[in-house]
Structures are given as structure tokens and as C-alpha cells.
Image (cartoon, grey):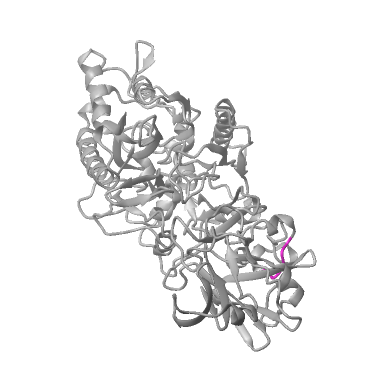
Amino acid sequence: MRTRTGIRRNPAGPVIVALVAAGSVCVTPLSPAHAATGTASADLRADVNRDGRVDVTGGTDSAGEDAWSTGRGAVMLPNIDDDTKRCPVKGPGGKPLSDAKLAACNDAADTKVNGSADAADLARIHSVPMAKVPKTAQGSLKITTGAKYTRLFLERDGAWVPVTSRTRLTPKELRAGVQFGVEATDVVRDTKKWDGRAVVRLTVTAGSRTTSDEVTLRVAPLLTHHHLQKAQQLMVTKVPGKGQWERLQQKFVKDLAAEVKKAGITKPLITFEKYGDPWAQDFVEPAYVSMTGPDGRPQTMRVMLRSDQRDREAGRELFEKVRGKNVGVVQAFDRSEPEDWTLNSMGNLETIPPYAHAGRSYPAGRIIQGWRKDSGEKPSKAVRTLLKAQGLQDPLLLDTSWLSVGHVDEFVQFLPADTPRGWRIGIADPEAGLKLLRDAQRAGHGRTKMFSVPGIAGQPTPKETIDKALASRYLVADNEMAARRIAANLEILERETGVTDAEVVRVPALYTRDGEATDASGDEVPVPRLTRMGGKAPLVDTLRERGQQKWMAGEDAAGAAGTVMTSAYVPGAVNGVLLGPDRYLAPRQWGPVIGGKDIFTEAVSAAYRRTGLKVSYLDDWYTYHLGMGEVHCGTNTLRDASAAWWKRS
């Protein structure tokens, strides 16, 4: 928005412009003779149309320069990466830094531009050359809105110089036009405190005449990935040690690397090795911010969103190992104790791919999270506030009251599809799981073992048969309940997105309520019911330390009064990883083997095959499944973020 006293030419002829109110001007024609005695007015331009070029000669970046919308308006990045790896990860004497100190250091924490990679993270704005300014002219800049969260640099003599209240632009600079760089120092966390906007004002004084102009920028929204974005790299924890469980987990990592390579992903696994938390899906949610860079190409920064679980040390490795060039970390902690600690895990955060429905558009997709409707418990308020503040992926809550761990990835996923929408919903189908067992029983296979997984030292193979499973006091009732709960969530998804039943992939699944096993100290540990775990199996101690059971310790395992809480009985196939548009990695099913074939593997493969996906399987029975999770829970995926988030692809 331009504010001037004096004159300026426009297509209608010379005018005098006087500010009447914000956004409005009073225009009075002047004679050419009068106009010729004036000089040009301050004119500041930003990349309003997001093409990577600041137009100082035409009008493509003029309209809307003092406004901002999803589709138009200048964008700046939160410069929270560490391009030169200068941030310390240890204190004096090698002592650990606090979480706050780890988070405090990034490229925006100082008033320097730390090399060319850091300069690439700056949004550019330019002053239009003022060829006729007198030698007494000078210019100044001020961030009038958002100054607490914004930093401005001036390119001078080949270097980036911080702009302060004492900075003055010389007549030579005003005549040539000046380039500025803008960075935000943080993401938007709460719109009540900052809505992400910054207004930069250029003021030019020439003699007795002063003119000014403003441009508005907004920090790029922090966005989570969806499954239409290509998988580029996977993350997993590699637990050190030589114990039985540790060796199995290390084999899981090795087998994962092989599957990733077969899917055509060339980057090696990122392995977390310091803290031994195997649930790589849960302590971090990979996200990103982006703008169009000065060269017209996407300038993207990955941002690791740490879970609001401050006593989960594994999140510290995001700062210590992952943060670096074009990779930042954000943590948002509630001050109060969480309502339900496990709901704050990032396995409880997934993203619907881009869609538009009922007058609302989500060009970057939309977040889903689970909440316990029966008790009213919700995920971290600080994280939900942060996610909503981005303005693009307004979180949708689904009911996970019926799940012990309570994560949305235990029953729903989103799959690419060659359809106008571009994606389908994958949903766990307990009714299909029960039908598989009943059909096998009717065919005379009731005495077949329910599980084909081999035993390991000190851990016997599961004993129940198909007959015993179907005769269980709880199994049928629990899966009928799970089917009703899933159907209610699917109804919400269909209503919100416009997806129809024909666009839903139903994947056979079975759930079971928790039982209790006893560890070596005599404490009860929740485990899936029936006989998959022996009463005092050695593995129970490992689950207490490594499984989701560790993070459920101290919580009310019974949930709300009358609520049955379950976990996967057969490894949850929907709780896998989409490795490519036609490649899916599921947990190995280890179901009943009839006629030489695992009936659950056959049914799961057929369900995905109908959508064009080839399924491979990874054994996670002892490492993750008995710990109330699956392959997806033990891994995380970095996806391509080069597409413009303001455009529906």
C-alpha cells in the first residue's frame, strides 16, 4: 500500500495522491508542468504472484501487494534450519542441552546470513529504481507488523546486512533499486499471538517530500505430507544391543532397507540410534514449508514436528542428528499435563490428500487426528492450535476411543488412485476378517492354527485355532464393535471429503481387547488377548520396556466407563507404508495357512491389488506387533514437497 504526499504519473495522467484511509486514495489531476517538477515515489515490490521473480518494471506483482490469500501474496520462510550445522548439540563439558536450548538455535536466531544456502531461504523484495532522486535523498525501512517474528536484510556491496532503525539507503542505492531479504524467525503457533504476516514499509525522503510504500508477506504454512507425494527416504530406529529382541529389531531394519531399495527409493535409511525408542512414527511428524525461490524453483525446507511428549527423549535426536541444511525442527509443548499421553504420538496424525468439497478446499490436504470421544480426551492443545494456525490443513478429529493406543493409523489410510479425485480411502474391515475365519471353519479347517508365526527361544508359538478364536467370549463381539466404530469414522470422512463407498478399499482386519501378562517383577503388562503371549513369557519384560505398553504405563487402561479398548489381533495391514504409487509394504500377516497359503495374506494382497498396488510384507510380529504397533508405527517417511501448496495438482 502506497502512502505519498506529492505527485505521481499513472495511465490516466499526472495525479496528486493523498492518503484518506487505509486502502483508499483521493486523486486530483495536475498540470503536466507542475508534475514535471516532482520525483518518483517510493515503490516496494514483492513476489506477490509467487513466480520467483519480483517484477519491478511491470504490474504483475502490484495488485494485492498489501493483502494475502492462499492463492496470492508474497511468502517468506521460517528460517529455522541450520544450513552450516553451527548449532551446538551439547553444553559445556559435553553435558546435554535442555530441550529449550536445543530448539533455540537455528539460522534465524542470529542477525547473520550464514552462507549461500541461508541466503536462498530469504524471500526477496525490491525497491523500484528512482532515477531522479536528488543527492540529498535517503530511504529507510521498517517492519510495521510482525516485527517480533521477522528479520530484514539489505544486499549491500555483495553482502547481506541486517536492517536496523539506523539503516539508511543512499541516493545511489535508491536510483539503482535495492534488493532486500526477509525471513521469519518461527512458524505460526497461535494466531492470537501472531497470524504470520509481516508488513515492510519503505520510506523515501527527498527534500521536503516524503513518500512511502508497503508490502505484505506471510510466513509459509507448516504442512504435513500426504500419500500423493512421492516417498523419497525412510526413517527408522536401530536399537543397539545383542539381546534377542534387539537382534530381531536389527533384522527388521535390514529387511526394511531391502524393501525400500526394491521400491526404487535410492536414499539410505535415516537411522535413530541414540535413545532406543523403536517407534519412529510416534516421536516425529515430517512436515515442510516452501516458497518459490529467486531462481523460480521451489525453495523447500523440511521441518520435523516433534511430538508433545517432552519426556520422550528420542525427539531430541531430531535436533542432534537430523537438523541441518534445509531441515529444521519445531517442538510445541503444552504447559499442563496431557489428557492422554499416547494421543500425542504422531502415529495419531495422518493427512487426507488434497480435495475440495462442499465449498471448502484443501489444496495441501487435511490432517486427521484421533480423540477419545467416550471420555473427551484430545491430543495436545498446543499442537492442535499450531496445526490449525497454518490455515490450510484444519485438523479433523476421528474417534479412537475403542483403540488401546488410540492412533488413527491403526484403522485408516489414504491410497493413490487413477481416478478424478486421485486417491481412495483404505479402511480396516473387521467384518471381512471374521468372514475369512468363518469361511475357513465351514470348509472344515476349524482346527487349523490361527497363527503361523514360528516361535522363538523362550516364546512358544501361539496355540489357538480358528475354532477357538471364533468361540472366544470376546473376539466376535469386539470385532463387531470395531466395525461399528470404523463405520462411524468412515461416515465422517465421506461427509467431509465427498468420497463415496465405491472409492473405499476395505482391507481384512481383526482386533482383540487387551489381556494382561505378568513381567519378571510381577507387574501386569497389557497384551493382546488370547494366547499369543504366554503368561510369563520372557518377551513380556521387553514389551514393558520397548512396546507401546511403555508409553501407556500409568494411564487408565480401561478408558471411559463401558468402553472396550482393542489392538490388532492379526497384524494390521492398513498400518503399513506406501513406498510408491504402486508399491505398498504391509506387516506380514502370519494368519492361518490353508492349502499352503496364508488366507489373510491372500485376502490383503487381493484388496490392494484391486487398487493397482503390489504388496510386499515385512515381519514385525515380535518387534512391533506384540508391542501394539506395526510397520508404519516403527518407521517414518520423507516425501517430495516440491509441488506448490497453493495449487491443486
Outermost residue, right side: 157
Report x, y in % for residue 479: 24, 36
- Where is residue 154, by image quadrant? bottom right
Asked if residue 580 is positioned above or below residue 86 in the image, the reply reads above
Report x, y in % for residue 255: 56, 29
Any part of residue 566 in sight: yes
Task: Based on the picture, tell me whether residue 528 belongs to the magenta stretch.
Answer: no
In front: 409, or 170?
Answer: 170
At horizontal 44% and vertical 48% (from top left) the residue drawn is 364
User: What count of labels does the image hold?
Assistant: 0
In front: 369, or 590?
Answer: 369
- Secondary structure of the magenta portion, mostly? loop
Residue 63 located left or right of residue 393? right
The magenta stretch is 110-114
Asked if residue 271 is positioned above or below residue 390 in the image, the reply reads above
Task: Based on the picture, tell me whether residue 112 belongs to the magenta stretch.
Answer: yes
- Where is residue 291, by image quadrant? bottom right
Outermost residue, top side: 595
For the C terminus, the quadrant is top left
Outermost residue, bottom side: 208
In front: 235, or 92?
Answer: 235
Asked if residue 263 is positioned above or below residue 316 in the image, the reply reads above
At horizontal 43% and vertical 69% (from top left) the residue drawn is 191
